């Protein structure tokens, strides 16, 4: 029987290399995988493209990656209140692609579903339209938004079974579930791992077909 369990965060990120694109779940701290974030910082890879809702705040979150200069570009919807990112951005050390939150989630969903893009009216006539193809449908203008995929998705779940089926803790689910569909390798940090059959099938949000590695995170 398939077993997706790995020993720790270092094993969960095995294969991460310089230049990879990485999705990290979380809305602020809710749904962010802290042990994985620290493991990536310890690994010291460089030139990452980061796809996330936000760019950290302070302390042991994505701010670690910016303090260490691991990120070349971030694609996100809310970079405010991220002091370390702000310092790097003002210094010209990191590139920002600012994406409205709903558009960001839909681009990730499109990447996971194998859709070549979608039309959105959000941003028409604004700076968000720069460099994008405009298409008129029924007399209304739309922007063609392209899908997002990643080499790795790092997300935080509540429970998983050894097969890799995952549940989430309420709003901590946020971007994690859709990111788990849109990456070549998906690693999930959870609070608890149980045997197959122990999870209520109706509570499973991310099926094991999307998950490569699960492990129990250890808080500092």
Image (cartoon, rainbow, N blue to C red):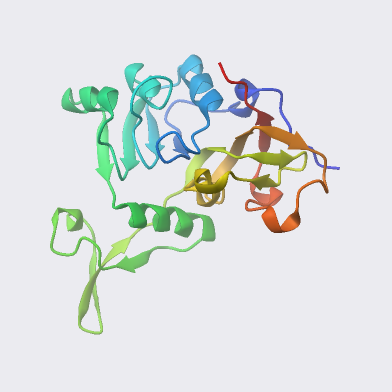
Residue 173, percent from left and from top? 53, 47
Residue situated in front as seen by the camera: 133 or 220: 220
Residue name at image x 29 percent, y 42 percent: 78
- Which residue shows up at 34% across the image and 33% down it? 55
Camera-nearest residue between 86 and 22: 86
Q: Residue at x 66, y 22 (%)?
A: 8
Say above or below: 172 vs 131: above
Whether residue 150 sits left or right of residue 136 in the image: it is right
- Quick one: quadrant of the C terminus? top right
Front residue (pair 197, 113):
197
Report the quarter where the N terminus lies.
Answer: top right
Locate residue 188 relative to residue 114 in the image: left or right.
right
Decide which of 148, 7 is in the foreground and name it: 7
Query: Is residue 64 visible in the rendered structure shown here?
Result: yes
State how many labels appear.
0
x, y percent for residue 160: 70, 41
Q: Quadrant of residue 29?
A: top left
């Amino acid at each position: 029987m398939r077993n997706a369990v790995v020993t720790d965060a270092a094993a969960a990120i095995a294969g991460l290399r310089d230049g990879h694109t990485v999705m990290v779940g979380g809305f602020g701290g809710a749904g962010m995988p802290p042990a994985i974030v620290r493991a990536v910082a310890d690994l010291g890879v460089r030139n990452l493209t980061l796809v996330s809702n936000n760019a950290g705040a302070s302390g042991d979150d994505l701010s670690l990656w910016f303090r260490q200069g691991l990120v070349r570009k971030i694609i996100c919807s809310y970079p405010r209140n991220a002091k370390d990112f702000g310092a790097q951005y003002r210094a010209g050390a990191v590139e920002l692609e600012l994406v409205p939150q709903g558009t960001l989630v839909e681009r990730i969903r499109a990447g996971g579903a194998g859709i070549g893009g979608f039309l959105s009216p959000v941003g028409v006539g604004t700076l968000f339209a720069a460099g994008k193809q405009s298409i008129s449908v029924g007399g209304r203008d739309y922007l063609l938004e392209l899908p997002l995929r990643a080499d790795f998705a790092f997300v935080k779940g509540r429970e998983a079974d050894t097969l890799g089926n995952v549940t989430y803790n309420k709003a901590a689910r946020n971007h994690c579930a859709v990111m788990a569909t849109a990456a070549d390798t998906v690693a999930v940090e959870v609070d608890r791992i149980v045997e197959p059959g122990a999870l209520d099938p109706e509570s499973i949000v991310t099926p094991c077909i999307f998950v490569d590695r699960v492990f129990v995170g250890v808080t500092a």
